[in-house]
Image (spheres, rainbow, N blue to C red):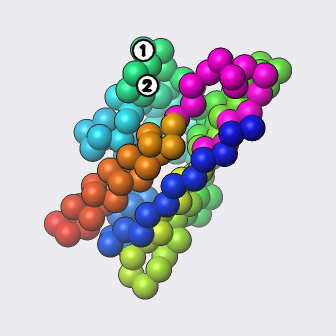
Amino acid sequence: MVLQTSEVLINARLSTVWDVLTDSGNMAVWNSGVTEIEGDLRDGETVRITTLGHDRPVRARVRQDTGEVMTWTSELPMRLLRVVRSFSLIPVSGRTLLKVTVEASGLLLRWSSPATQQDLDDFVAAARHRAELLDRTS
């Protein structure tokens, strides 16, 4: 199993950060590492996500809980490969702590290339920048 985590304190309201993370139409705009998302990032939906360096999209099932937690789960049959990306938002004195965790497991893990730690760090930094920019203009 591979477990990676990155977090950042964002000088923006929780609702703004949530809007950034669930806006599939603009995710490719803010340098998130995602080049395209087909579908809506809503609870119970399945989306197709294409990332930098990969030509083929990955299907992921979206789960959301109370506007503060979201997971994207993608898996191959018989759990040959399972990747769960979790987004947690925690309010902190008018700001928001964003924590993103990627958990990858399965027999094909050694031949796959889930996100690197740098990819994850770049994603949270870009989300921070986008949310702070949008919160300032609201």
Dot 2 surroundings within 10 Å: few (below 14), some, or many (20 or more)?
A: some
Q: Nearer the viewer, residue 30 or 63?
A: 30
Query: Which residue range is magenta in the image?
Result: 102-115
Q: Nearer the viewer, residue 24 or 85?
A: 85
The residue indicated by pointer 2 is 50
Picture layout, residue 117 above or below residue 53? below
Residues at circles 2 and 1 in contact by the CB criterion of under 8 Å = yes
Mark-to-mark CA distance, 2 and 1: 7 Å
Q: In the image, is residue 110 part of the stretch drawn in magenta?
A: yes
Q: Residue at x 35, y 63 (%)?
A: 16
Left or right position of 118 against 65: left
Q: Position of residue 19 (x, y in %)?
A: 38, 56
Three-letter residue code for mark 1: Asp
Q: Residue at x 57, y 25 (%)?
A: 113
The residue indicated by pointer 1 is 55
Q: Residue furthest top?
A: 55
